Image (cartoon, rainbow, N blue to C red):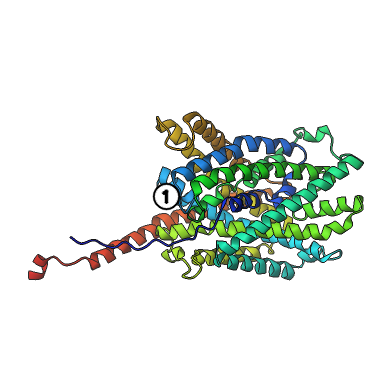
Amino acid sequence: MSTTAQPDQPHLIRALGRRDLVLLFVVAVFNLNVVPSIAANGGVTIWLWIISLLLFFWPQGIAVIELAHRYPGEGGVYLWAKEVFGDFHGFLSGWCYWTNNMLYVPTVMLYFVGVSVYVLGPGHQGLPDNKIFAASVSLSLLSLLTLLNILGLGVGKWINNIGAIGTFIAAIVLVGLGIVIWSRFGSGITAADFKIPANPRFVLNSFGVICFGLVGLELASVMGDEIQDPRRTLPGAVAWGGLLSGTLYIAATLTLLIAVGKNVNVLQGVVQAVTGMAARVGVSWISVPFALMLSLAIAGIGSAWIGGCSRIPFVAGLDSYMPSWLGKVHPRYATPYAALIVQGIVSAVLVILNFVGAGVQETFQKLLSLAVVLQLVPFVYMFGALVKFAVTESVPKGQYGRITLFLAGTSGFLTTILGIALVFFPAQQITSLWQYELWMFGGTLFFIGLAAFFFFVYGRRKASRQIHLAAIAAPVPASEVRR
């Protein structure tokens, strides 16, 4: 009796402990770069934050813990949808999660350029308008973060951790100055600003962006094979990371409204608010170190999403739904270097495209809106899985009971669908409605169509080649030889 040796699966290093995960969640979830575009719609967005925290963020934490407990391993949203709904749904979930990152990372690079120039001091704030300067800085940061993640999470995680620390410091300074301004000069907003406006069209887009801002708890599970004792480490890290991120979001939005009202620049709004508040209370010197801390936070955000999302094409390569070389692991650093390089190249192309066509703020908003749609698709599957467990299992096999699974799944599913639908309403930075809708519908169909191509066409070709190679390698029966 003979046996066929199975090829060894790539080995990844378990480098992430609980502290690393909490900091990763904060730096991945709490993104100051989305706060200005949300605060620009006024005080009503505070209610949207609260609604989203209750109906989307809390169910997200339950879904992450439940699904990570049932299906631990590398791949996260890709693996979960595949196990619960089948191969194509798993691929589509992972594909949307990854391609959203292709659109989101360029906005992070663009945001870094807008903030980092404040480190150079007064008189340099116009540099982001120089396309050569902005493109050079964006591509340099993208290359550096990709390289550090290729060197391994043992190195890359420190960028995430430094980014989380920078996020904490930036948020504390922002909120602290807001409290000082409010106590000395009062607030520039009134109770009327928290009411639903007569024309809520622009506010509708904010709800989808808020849901987008609250994703990230699932990111560590994408790297499930790189977490130390994930079943014990993950639940506590999700709870602490979620609590800290939600609190920081509401506090930062309120501070921007108190400091500058609705006249917020979507790219430089945070650092401009701090600069203005610091001047009013006589501590103008704080602007430069604040810009430095915020720059570190933005770099950490970029590193977290570059490193995390690269695991999607890595796993898809192993499953042969994308080129198999995407599943290669670096022989020295034990990282999915091929997937990281491809991801870096695609992001670099989109970084360059950022500086062609529409104005910077409009381009930022269009990229962000399409990223919202693609990012939320995997959450439809995540919450749908909870509902399926609650309905089909008489005795749940995971962490939570049927009622909790059903309530969290239903709430999250409906909120996610609503968030996707509302982001198709244009934000106030959009100048052409028909161009925006063409971008949104066309972009969504393009990326989903590309996913179908890889799965049904490339995957089928791959399977056919494997069958052909197996037939060639099969031994010829003795009866056939005698003939």
Q: How crowded is mark 1: few (under 14 residues within 10 Å), some or many (20 or more)?
A: some
In which quadrant of the rendered image does the C terminus lie? bottom left
- Name the residue beneath numbered marker 1: 88
Type of amino acid under label 1: Phe
Q: Which of 264 and 7 is in front in this view?
A: 7
Residue drawn 70% across and 60% down? 110
Q: Measuring 45% from the left and 32% from the top, which residue is drawn there?
A: 390
In the depicted structure, whether residue 353 falls above or below residue 417: below
Q: Is residue 142 left or right of residue 475?
A: right
Q: Residue at the left extreme?
A: 482
Relative to residue 408, is residue 437 depicted above or below? below
The reply to whether residue 407 is visible in this rendering is: yes
* Residue 89 visible within the image: no
Residue at 70 percent of width and 46 percent of height? 427
Residue 94 in the figure: left or right of residue 428:
left
Q: Which of 13 and 32 is in front in this view?
A: 13
- Quadrant containing the N terminus is bottom left
Q: In which quarter of the image is residue 351?
A: bottom right
**Residue pictured at 40% horizontal, 29% vertical:** 394
> Relative to the observer, which residue lies in front, 10 or 407?
10
**x, y percent for residue 405:** 50, 33
Q: Where residue 347 appears, x then y in whole percent?
A: 60, 63
Residue 67 appears at what percent x and percent y? Answer: 48, 43
Residue 271 quadrant: bottom right
What x and y, as percent, mark residue 329? 46, 66
Residue closest to the eye, 331 or 389:
331
Q: How many labels does the image show?
A: 1
Q: Circle 1 — which element?
A: helix
